[in-house]
Amino acid sequence: MILLKNKYFISIAATIAVFAASINLQSVFAAPTDEAVVSQELVEDTIKPTLISQKFEANKNAEARAEKLVAVKAEQKRLNDEAAAAAKAKAEAAAKAKAQAEAKAAAAKKAAAAKKAAAQKAASTQAATTNVSGVNKGTFKISFYDPAVLGSNMGYGGVAANLSVFPKGTRLKISMSNGQVLYRTVNDTGTFAYSNPRQLDVAMPNSSIPSAGILSATVEVIG
């Protein structure tokens, strides 16, 4: 009897447990509440479009920054190219100016050398053509010097002259204003001769130098 009662109570307890479980299962699969519906609508209508808009703006800003960076790089390259071109042009201009200056200096130097050579040739030609034997060269100022006093061993047969007028080796007949006639060979020159081409400095012992010191003379080329 007691055993039957226990089985009865066990059966009732099992039935109650099955019923309770079915109730909990229904609550799980029950329709969403109003709060759940509102939250879903908030996500669909507000939050999701806002996020999409923000993402679009972020992408748009990123593209703008990328385009601006490309433009900045292009402008920097243009400026660098212009600076390089200007520097190259300046260097080329400087090199050209230097070459022109060097060429001008070389031409001037060459012209000066040619002029000097022509002058020397003309002087030599003139001396060769005018210093003909028997030609009277006109009146000259005559001064005197003693080579021995100057420590020279050239002797007393020479005369110092401007070599463009009388080249070395020219034989002269010097008829002085005191009546004395000298025959001398040009063998020397001096600083006086460059500023006084019509002066002769005759070698003579101090004891024989005229007291006047300076005379004039008619000079004739004799050889």
Image (tube, rainbow, N blue to C red):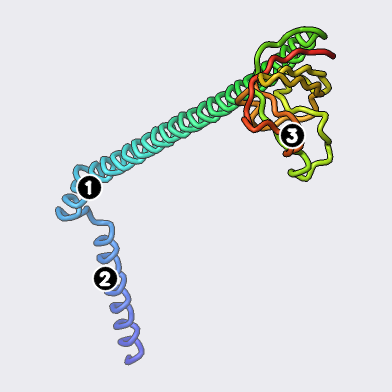
Residue neighbourhood size for the residue with mark 3, other residues' Cα within 10 Å, grouped as few (<14), some (14–19), many (≥20): few
Foreground tag (1 vs 2):
1
Position of residue 72 in the picture relative to residue 106 (left or right):
left
Residue neighbourhood size for the residue with mark 1, other residues' Cα within 10 Å, grouped as few (<14), some (14–19), many (≥20): few
Q: As rendered, which of 65 and 191 lies closer to the eye? A: 191
- Image height check: is 54 above or below 209? below
Amino acid under label 3? Ser
Residue 122 x, y percent position in the rendering: 72, 12
Q: Are marks 1 and 2 in contact (CB under 8 Å)?
A: no
From the image, tell me which residue sits under label 3: 208
Residue 135 x, y percent position in the rendering: 76, 7
Name which residue lies at 22% across and 47% down.
47
Give the CA separation, mark 3 to mark 2: 171 Å
Residue 161 x, y percent position in the rendering: 72, 25
Position of residue 90 in the picture relative to residue 116 (left or right):
left
Name which residue lies at 58% across and 25% down.
101
Q: Considering only order in the chain, which callout, 3 or 1, is on the residue closer to the N terminus?
A: 1
Check the picture and name the quadrant holding the C terminus.
top right
Name the residue furthest bottom: 2
Q: As rendered, which of 144 and 22 lies closer to the eye? A: 144
- Image height check: is 5 above or below 217? below
Name which residue lies at 27% across and 45% down.
51
Foreground tag (3 vs 2):
3
Image quadrant in which you'd find residue 188: top right
From the image, tell me which residue sits under label 1: 47
From the image, tell me which residue sits under label 2: 20
Amino acid under label 1? Ile
Give the CA separation, mark 1 to mark 3: 137 Å
